Amino acid sequence: MFLFSRVLATTRLFSSSAVAQFPKLKSHSGAKKRWRSIASGIFKRGKAGHKHLNVNKSPKRKNALSQTAYSHGSQTATLKKLLPYGSP
C-alpha cells in the first residue's frame, strides 16, 4: 500500500493538471531568427543589405538600410501563426 501511494504521488509531480495537454505548437525557426515581437502586437526586423559591399552605396541608402522595419497587417497575421508564443 505504501509503495502504491508513493508511485501515485511521484506521478502527480509531473502532470500539471488532470486534463489532457495538447501538444505544444512549434515556432518557425526562420521567422524566429529574423523577427522580434513588440508590446503592441506587431513585429520588427532588421533590413537586409547593410552588412557588406557598402562602398558603392550612397550614405542615404546605407542609412535607410540601417533603420528598423515593422510588419504590416497581412504580415502580422502570418507571423502570429509562425510565432505562436512571440519571440525572445
Image: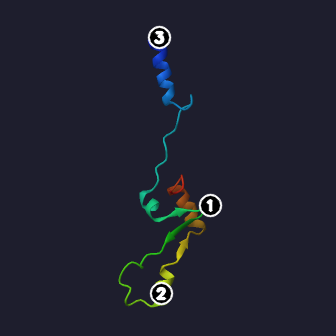
Q: Secondary structure at mark 1?
A: loop
Give the residue at mark 1.
Answer: 39
Residue type marked 2: Arg
**What's the distance in space between the residues labelled 2 and 1, CA to CA?**
29 Å
- Above or below residue 29? Residue 72 is below
Amino acid type assigned to the residue bearing label 1 in the image: Ala
Vertical position of residue 21 compared to residue 69: above or below: above
Q: CA distance from mark 3 to mark 1?
A: 51 Å
Residue 48: quadrant of the picture = bottom left
Task: Check disc 3 and report its element: helix, strand or loop.
Answer: helix
Q: Residue at x 41, y 89 (%)?
A: 57
Instruction: Say which residue appears at 51% left-offset and 30% top-offset.
Output: 15
N-terminal of the pair, mark 2 or mark 1, is: 1
Label 3 sits on residue: 2
Q: Residue at x 49, y 44 (%)?
A: 24
Q: Quadrant of residue 72?
A: bottom right
Disc 3 or 1, which lies upstream in sequence? 3
Residue 78's spot in the image, x, y percent? Answer: 54, 61
Disc 3 versus disc 1: nearer the observer: 3
Residue 19, quarter of picture: top right
Describe residue 43's horizontal placement relative to residue 3 as left or right: right
Rounded to the nearest angstrom, the CA distance separating label 2 from label 3 is: 74 Å
Q: 19 or 33: which is nearer to us?
A: 33
Label 2 Cα crowd, 10 Å radius (few <14 / some 14-19 / many 20+): few
Residue type at the position of mark 3? Phe
Residue 71 point in image, percent of width and height: 56, 68
Q: Position of residue 43 (x, y in %)?
A: 56, 65
| SS at mark 2 in the image | helix
Q: How many marks?
A: 3
Q: Earlier in the sequence, mark 2 or mark 3?
A: 3
Q: Provide the residue designation for mark 2.
A: 61
